[in-house]
Image: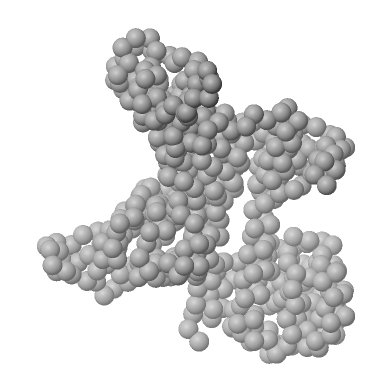
Amino acid sequence: METQNVLYPDAKILIIDDDVDVLESLSANLRLTGYHNVESLHDGRLAMEKLGEGHCACILLDLMMPLIPGKVLLEKIEENFPHIPVIVITAIDDIEMVISCMRAGAYDYLVKPIRLQRLLTTVENTIRYKSMGDEKLSLTKSLLEKGSQEHEAFKEIITHHTRMKSVFSYIEVIADTPYPVLLTGESGTGKGMIAKGLHKLSKCHGKFVSINVAGLDDTLFSDTLFGHKKGAFTGADSDREGLLSKAENGVVFLDEIGDLEMSSQIKLLRLLQDREYNPLGFDKLRTTNAKFVLATNRNLEKLISEGKFRYDLFYRISTHSAHIPPLKERKEDLPFLVKHFIRKHAKILGKQALDYRPQLLETLSHYSFPGNVRELENLISDAVAVSKGRFISMETIEKNIKIKPLKQSGNSSTSSLEPSQGPEPVLSLKEAEDKHIASVLSIANNNLSLTARLLKINYSTLHRKLKKVREEQS
């Protein structure tokens, strides 16, 4: 069997079984498929001491052992190390015993003889489950400890929005992991700035290298990323180092990956799995230790269903993922963004301090911003450039967001902003409160205690409010 690649090659796996042959077989199969840190015990009585030595990602536990019953050991592990998932191994497919073990805390079970594919799938899913659990605990701790503190790595992103702050906290938690990070969201939401913030937070001390892969055919994609040897193709007059070589011990940001050709997707998958690549024209493989951050404004699940994106690649890149909310969902950031961009572009253009008229925010609040923060900055920079007085030009902004008069009804006249569908409905105080509670509840993964602490109310008050919402909806 050839060595394969797994998502968590360095995860520590402990196998406990009194049958030495089973221990050797399971250990060998796991190592051959890519797990480097596999340990085994033939005496279950030593398990608690072994687990106390250090971090363990997963346990394979035999039920039928003479020195200590597996069920007893399972209960001890659950009591002392509840964060470590246990996969029960049994020679008898006894459904009552399986149910009993699951109730005692087992994550999954395997029946001997164990098929290799079943073993690999179960182990990888179990470790993935633990990894995500650890991540949630770290994120919860981060949210509680940081409170309203500023996120230093993202200080260039102007926001007071709760969901954006939760994205920052999430990135801070997973920045040091070796796994790829997928950023989704509309164009102009700041995915590139989030990636740069991740680079600052990570242990990657090399360069941050950004590549927009939209419009790159397979040859250009390979040449840009991997480089080429002189004579590799017509026009290759000299050797060229690819951008991967410049990102040694750094971060590679691949933007618009939803536009990759299928052949390029295969190459990217192999790169992420093996950490190896071939520059065009070279026979010798090169390796990379860069961390990968990938971004797209497209719906990858939809592309998968249409046969335009590989499911295995999606699975590989989405170990960690974050969705960046569009500007139309964070309108409360408009005053801060407008002030920031006015100051920035007035300074660039050498103009005196400028201000804006109150109706500007009213106008912008009715606009959908298809280009998001990037479009807002363009609007403000253009208005600053043509402004002659103390205030930035409203006329320029109104022209650029295409205000069109609606048909008049009676003596009234109003205006509409395109391509927006008009202003959002005004929420009552009760509706706004319910919406805010639902948002914080989502951030806290439906943990009521955490939600109450984040909202700075007591648990009983939160419970009463949620109960009233449910009654109103029923």
Query: In the shown orientation, is residue 413 left or right of residue 352?
Result: right
Which residue is most to the top?
A: 389
Residue at 49% across / 57% down in the picture?
299
Does residue 362 appear in this view? Answer: no
Percent of width and height locating residue 247: 35, 53
Which residue is most to the front?
A: 410
Q: What is the number of callouts on the image? A: 0
Percent of width and height locating residue 459: 84, 38
Does residue 60 appear in this view? Answer: yes
Q: In which quadrant of the rendered view does residue 463 lie?
A: top right
Percent of width and height locating residue 363: 48, 24
Query: In the shown orientation, is residue 125 left or right of residue 385?
Result: right
Q: Viewer-proximal residue, 316 or 413?
A: 413
Colouring method of the image? one colour
Q: In which quadrant of the rendered view does residue 351 lie?
A: top left
Q: Is residue 458 above or below residue 191?
A: above
Residue at 36% across / 29% down in the picture?
400
Q: Is residue 272 above or below residue 464?
A: below
Percent of width and height locating residue 391: 39, 13
Residue at 44% across / 37% down in the picture?
419
Q: In which quadrant of the rendered view does residue 345 lie?
A: top left
Residue at 24% across / 69% down in the picture?
280
